Amino acid sequence: MCGIVGVSDNRNAAQLAYLGLFALQHRGQEAAGIVTADGKRVTGRTALGLVAEAFPELTLKTLKGRTAVGHVRYATSGDGDLKNAQPLIFDNVHGPIAIAHNGTLTNAFSLRRKLEKRGAIFRTSTDSEVIVHLIARHPGPVEDAVIEALRQVEGAYSILFVTPTKLIAARDPRGFRPLVLGRLNRSYVFASETTALHQLGARCVREIEEGEIAIVEDGHLKTLKPFKQEKKAHCVFEQVYFARPDSVQFGKGIQETRRALGRELAKEMSGTVAADIVVPVPDSGVPAALGYAQESGLHLELGFVRSHYIGRTFIQPAQVLRDNAVALKLSPVRELLKGKRIVLIDDSIVRGTTSRRICSMLRAVGVKEIHMAVSSPAIVSPCYYGIDTPSKSELIAATKSTDGIRRFLGVDSLHYLSVEGLLRAVGGETPENTSFCTACFTGKYPTPIVDFTIGQSSRKGDFRPALNGIEEPASEPVKEGKQ
Amino acid sequence: MCGIVGVSDNRNAAQLAYLGLFALQHRGQEAAGIVTADGKRVTGRTALGLVAEAFPELTLKTLKGRTAVGHVRYATSGDGDLKNAQPLIFDNVHGPIAIAHNGTLTNAFSLRRKLEKRGAIFRTSTDSEVIVHLIARHPGPVEDAVIEALRQVEGAYSILFVTPTKLIAARDPRGFRPLVLGRLNRSYVFASETTALHQLGARCVREIEEGEIAIVEDGHLKTLKPFKQEKKAHCVFEQVYFARPDSVQFGKGIQETRRALGRELAKEMSGTVAADIVVPVPDSGVPAALGYAQESGLHLELGFVRSHYIGRTFIQPAQVLRDNAVALKLSPVRELLKGKRIVLIDDSIVRGTTSRRICSMLRAVGVKEIHMAVSSPAIVSPCYYGIDTPSKSELIAATKSTDGIRRFLGVDSLHYLSVEGLLRAVGGETPENTSFCTACFTGKYPTPIVDFTIGQSSRKGDFRPALNGIEEPASEPVKEGKQ
Amino acid sequence: MCGIVGVSDNRNAAQLAYLGLFALQHRGQEAAGIVTADGKRVTGRTALGLVAEAFPELTLKTLKGRTAVGHVRYATSGDGDLKNAQPLIFDNVHGPIAIAHNGTLTNAFSLRRKLEKRGAIFRTSTDSEVIVHLIARHPGPVEDAVIEALRQVEGAYSILFVTPTKLIAARDPRGFRPLVLGRLNRSYVFASETTALHQLGARCVREIEEGEIAIVEDGHLKTLKPFKQEKKAHCVFEQVYFARPDSVQFGKGIQETRRALGRELAKEMSGTVAADIVVPVPDSGVPAALGYAQESGLHLELGFVRSHYIGRTFIQPAQVLRDNAVALKLSPVRELLKGKRIVLIDDSIVRGTTSRRICSMLRAVGVKEIHMAVSSPAIVSPCYYGIDTPSKSELIAATKSTDGIRRFLGVDSLHYLSVEGLLRAVGGETPENTSFCTACFTGKYPTPIVDFTIGQSSRKGDFRPALNGIEEPASEPVKEGKQ
Amino acid sequence: MCGIVGVSDNRNAAQLAYLGLFALQHRGQEAAGIVTADGKRVTGRTALGLVAEAFPELTLKTLKGRTAVGHVRYATSGDGDLKNAQPLIFDNVHGPIAIAHNGTLTNAFSLRRKLEKRGAIFRTSTDSEVIVHLIARHPGPVEDAVIEALRQVEGAYSILFVTPTKLIAARDPRGFRPLVLGRLNRSYVFASETTALHQLGARCVREIEEGEIAIVEDGHLKTLKPFKQEKKAHCVFEQVYFARPDSVQFGKGIQETRRALGRELAKEMSGTVAADIVVPVPDSGVPAALGYAQESGLHLELGFVRSHYIGRTFIQPAQVLRDNAVALKLSPVRELLKGKRIVLIDDSIVRGTTSRRICSMLRAVGVKEIHMAVSSPAIVSPCYYGIDTPSKSELIAATKSTDGIRRFLGVDSLHYLSVEGLLRAVGGETPENTSFCTACFTGKYPTPIVDFTIGQSSRKGDFRPALNGIEEPASEPVKEGKQ
């Protein structure tokens, strides 16, 4: 996953982008970058690590210009990856252009192969670079080149482009990833989530619409909708897990939505378990647990102390720390839990290994019964639109029955929210008529998946390397129509 | 403040000490150190920063030996300070000896002056080094030298010493700072808090008693109580704020104690305010807020989202981040708070500046009434026993009336827990007959303060530099008896 | 200037390339790089600084594969320049290809402009990248693509290319820069100078001929001469200054050639000055001074002690050191020089500032007369074929008369070797019929200079940045035919 | 070996000390340090590596004060050694005092043992720290304490002390190590060699005499000679090898002295060998070779090209580089040497391994006869006064006969200068009546050697660690009287 932020017409553009990235840090902790444009040049810096680590004082001061775009990225670790960190700046016939992209393209590999055959030299292994090569091959004004380039790509994108004089925002026609527009005095601000707007003092104006292109130049905003209209496919996992609780999406606070998920879960589970207390897995399970407690009438108890000192540090910690990561992060409060029957609330289960360790820690301090309740449906299929889910073979719900998962976790009962309950809670919708993409819970992908074998992680195949005759995909990707 | 941990008779001694330090990270984030003893040598490493940053993989592996002692330290920043990071190792007539000290001595400066007159050369500006010089000047077995040295110092200390073959623990006769003894198979484990014992898999045996010396040698534990018995003076601020919620002190879980503080506060405030919801300042205010909600019957709401990405990073972040530190760390959830009358719960107020910013953020999202409720009494006097409180002139409650503080914070009403309520909640005691030191809340110090002017921060005068004729204390320290 | 080395079919290929680069360090101290090919992949590392700094132990070990190519580079300082360090690896339709280039192309900017108009995205500001884009746009076998690409470029190049399975060497049709072929058991070795061959234990086979392409694949060497034959134009400044004294070029030892230059100079100066001793400027003036002493019968004296501790260090030294750089590097031996009339021998004078400081130091220790004798002609024109001379306005001999230079240096007389003497000494040739390029001494360029204004430094205009509408060349480059 | 420099009464004191250290870099490349005093404080910095690496721009600027002392050190590598780098600053009853010491004490271990028994805590493993502990235990004015401390130590010392207001220089009564006094306007300058005075623009006033103490305070110089007079014992190896050729000692230029050694050698060898040319081992053999050539009438030829890129870099180079260190540093000029009979001149032979490799390289390029001629006598005994010679068992001349050495080196004949010739060349003295210490050539030590077993390297036993019951010397040191 990634987060993006853009600021126009502001003498503190880089500082504001930095604050915005900080608020979007949960969307990507691997690398961070900021580029600025001063009317003549586009310059920038990317670095591995958290925003606060990537931009020390002096570095930030060197980023001059009244337009800035920032990007945070979640991906693999390793030095080599720095070349993939965004925003990426490319020199081409239009002059320098920077790109910051949230989402994943589903036909990038095919396009890259075609471009390489026509002489293109790729610098990164990102799907985003394909868009820039398409732009570089199109004459005429840069916004026309952007539109023509985007016409050729498939999949999910919320993108910010920067040229020396323009800031361009674009969102794909299905609107998989969020993108909002804000205003701060005379500046236009774009961001993945509203919390970033608030953080830098801007007010939220509206969402960038599905398929909309917004161009800021000379202090003016111009918007276009050049693409064919498609059925909306907002990512529902943003609601369940990804977005920050203090953000607002589609007019509704995320924390409220998550509390509603907890309430819906309590309704669906009503009468099925006898428990003493409700215990959230911190921090992601807390809002749903509050909703569950309110709906069920059970007491909420903070059964875990969460350490604030474990996390992604720039310096690789010792093995002994990594081995004990779960226990170091979450410490059960023995006195509170001993002998109790608990409903344990988490927002989702991916591989199940963390949940299993948590449950085993709970047993060790004497919890009597664990009723695991998940405030979303079982994840059965990988995401190809920007969320970093593992391949089907690693998704516990794709390989085990609910009872198999229950036994794996070592709990007394296991409960998932239904897809119906999920859509009801997030927006009063039904599976038959929804504006959300629920592919991870249902396996129904709203677009063709050109470049990936369904079931394979988009992360691993991430982006196939250059067509150098060496690392061809092991199996031919399957095309799969909209369902 | 500092945290200490010691492990004997274990081939993974350094790793265990590391895990223990990790669990004690909240007691000190400035520097970390681990020393090990292998029967012949005492070697170690100290570094600035968090435990995970200070000890990368390879470093930890070089620390060999079956005894290990670790230390985390909270103090000023700056490179120069590394020389003060503990454990400190000294070569002397007894061979090498390492010291890890939690607490502050109140007569260290006077002793240092005397020792320098007799030829001593000091290496650090810590009070702890004084103890080692006293040891180095005493012949005979090292444990005798330790006892004779400790006989000469005043104030607060929980200390671990390491020689090539011995691990020695000592706690001052009043027991200001905690120190517990645990067992892990054949290993003895000492730690500031029980959570560290649990983290490394040890079970808690008992507290090291006030004035007790414990010596581990050849796998055997021997304990002595060589000092005159004094009235107990356990630090009550450990209960209120410092200790981790999952630790147990004096047989009671800290989280439970804090919930009891919240309940006591609700009782004392009963009938004084009309509010819609209870909102904690995360994370420290949460347990008291739960207690308050349960006692008062009001709903608890998570009115703030806390960022996990702000914190002490090894790399100094940009100014713009430091300027917005409170807002970046705590983000109010607008939809939840707008138009509400809230009871805002925090554990304590020191300077009041952070609370003021929090209240101003709440007003900005439309909170109608703020009733600030603090689950401890007003802090009116600096600590000279190891907690890093500022000088009296910076303590808001030492310079302003309660109504003055209320106005400074911009709240509708302000409520502190009474000293009576505090002592009732922490252990059913009364001010007249208590085992706790409450000097920060009452100004009544249980020992003479030889080296500090009362009211002055122990941090600034920290430890006076070498008697080099240059930096003499500006004013003569006042001696002040027990009151 | 740059140095290149290539090794095929050897399991220690990277180590051998490293040794070779070490021997070629004098050809470039700014950055170093090594790439290896293992039949499937091309991987590598470049770093700023000297070879020994750029490749610590561990780094070198990670470079696996039986083919390796190394490059040392002399250019501007600054972190940003790392992206220009060679060998550069590019992914393209032919798979990965690496390039290591010594020399400068004279039509690279025009070609880049054309390529960008056709959609090319450039990664570096090197002229070398143009060649790779030309290769990427040509289908068919990679060696054909290399030949077609080189057909389009003008100027100086000795290049090594690496693909997963091939090592390709190429030298331009005029042979500006040297390139030799060696053999080490079953390995083929290419290098800028013979000293590199000796350093890694290889024997010298022959020079790569002007306009020759050599391809090593599967242990076999194949050579082609696909280009139209041109008049030879070997760089004479390699003889005068650049090449290492222990290298052999065109069958003659460089140290011997330089001694011959000294002898020739003594002959030309015969009877013009009365002096007591001959003093070389270390180290470059020593061989010519020996020749001069032998021819003139004067005593050679080591009048300067040269410090081995000043030089390019990775860590930027303090200003005070840079200000005193000449004095710190060369310290005159007072006892030896006082009251003497000396012939001071140096190999060349570029800006004259260093010579001036040296002469002023000699005066300060009491030298009575200084007769400056230079073992090459006056430098009057910049090099556009790879040597980093400054622009005409900074070349002292392009702006001052010989007497003006004499006064600037503060010497009693000043003597340059004639162009005739130079060509006689290096190979018994005459200006009318020579195989050497003497453009820096005569202003007669053997090729058209498409992209540079004559007189401008090739360094500054180095390589013009991307055609981004911003940094167009201030003045239109003048085309100038062969003269 | 070490080098020291001190500057008083100058607002650029640190910069001048830095320049001085740079000129003394040949005396120590392992670590460098500078301390400054500003009337109130003594502050400083030490770092591993060369002077230019150890003091980047910003660091140097932070060293404020009108008095500065610098130190360069030659010793083992390794991070741990930083604590031993000088100048060392100690806080003690006299206030802060810094020490910079060139030389080795021969009774430091015995003194340390006594001091530890009396409570002293040592910080380093240097012999120099002993002096500071002796000072710290003496009341009264600091210069009295210095004198009393020096009265108790034996061996070699040229020392600079710094207090907030004083700069004190001291040289041991035998004057083993050099120390000169210079003047720069109102500043006094002390340095190990005159070249350092020249480098920072000072004129040489005189040597600090044997047993002299010089105190600079308030711009005035006061000198004392408080010790009993001893027979002079200037290190003759400074003349042969250690001092820089452009320094002057005892009124004579070092380069001239070395040329005289070469002439003396030619005289002693007259008629013994038939050779074509004289070839020096660069750079140390060059002056003697010039003398030899002049005396013998043979031609001097520069048979080796020396690389300036091998040397002590801060970054550890790859193993392959270390393995080929000699070949990478010295490259024979094949064309010059092939088929020749040469006299190969070097200044000294220690272990013989480097010479052996050089000779083998000469054979490989076809040298016909090698007549190795050494411009000093055979080294048969370790130095205990500051030069870092290996133990007797590693000194080739202590374990092999001259013919054995000749065979080990693989040369046709081997010639050493006689002790008589040496003393004649350096000062017209005789072995019976000399002011030089020739212990390394004769085994006759001018002082008792309290702490070392004769024959053992002073480096290994360097300085015995703290008396911690663990690392007692393996064998009891033998006392040996003056001979």
Image: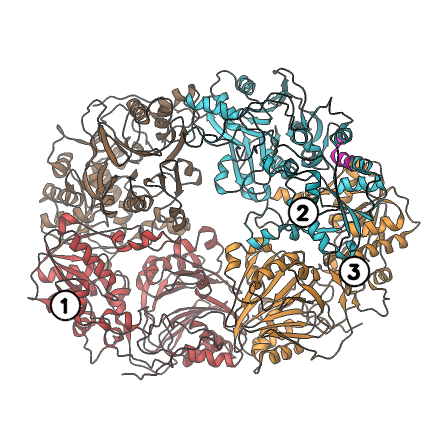
Chain colours: A red, B brown, C orange, D cyan
Label 3: which secondary element: loop
- Percent position (x, y) of residue B309? 33, 54
Part of the protein shown in magenta: D250-261
Q: Is residue D358 left or right of residue A24?
A: right
Residue A95 showing in the rendered view: no
Query: Disc 2 residue type?
Result: Arg
Question: Which label is found at residue C380?
Answer: 3
Query: Disc 1 residue type?
Result: Glu
- Percent position (x, y) of residue B479? 29, 21
Question: Which label is found at residue A444?
Answer: none
Residue mark closest to the camera, 2 vs 3 = 2
Label 2: which secondary element: helix
> Considering depth in this image, is D217 or B7 the residue closer to the camera?
B7
Whether callout 2 and callout 3 share a subunit is answered no
Q: Residues within 10 Å of mark 2 (few under 14, many from 20)?
A: some
Label 3 marks which chain's residue? C
Question: Which residue does the numbered mark 1 point to in the structure image?
Answer: A264
> Considering depth in this image, is C233 or D370 the residue closer to the camera?
D370
Residue D115 showing in the rendered view: yes
Q: Looking at the rendering, in which quadrant would you find the N terminus of chain B?
A: top left
- Percent position (x, y) of residue B27? 29, 41
Q: Quadrant of residue A390?
A: bottom left
Question: Which residue does the numbered mark 2 point to in the structure image?
Answer: D356
Q: CA distance from mark 2 to mark 3?
A: 47 Å
> Considering depth in this image, is A178 or D277 the residue closer to the camera?
D277
Query: Disc 3 residue type?
Result: Val
Q: Looking at the rendering, in which quadrant would you find the C terminus of chain B?
A: top left
Q: Is residue B18 left or right of residue C17?
A: left
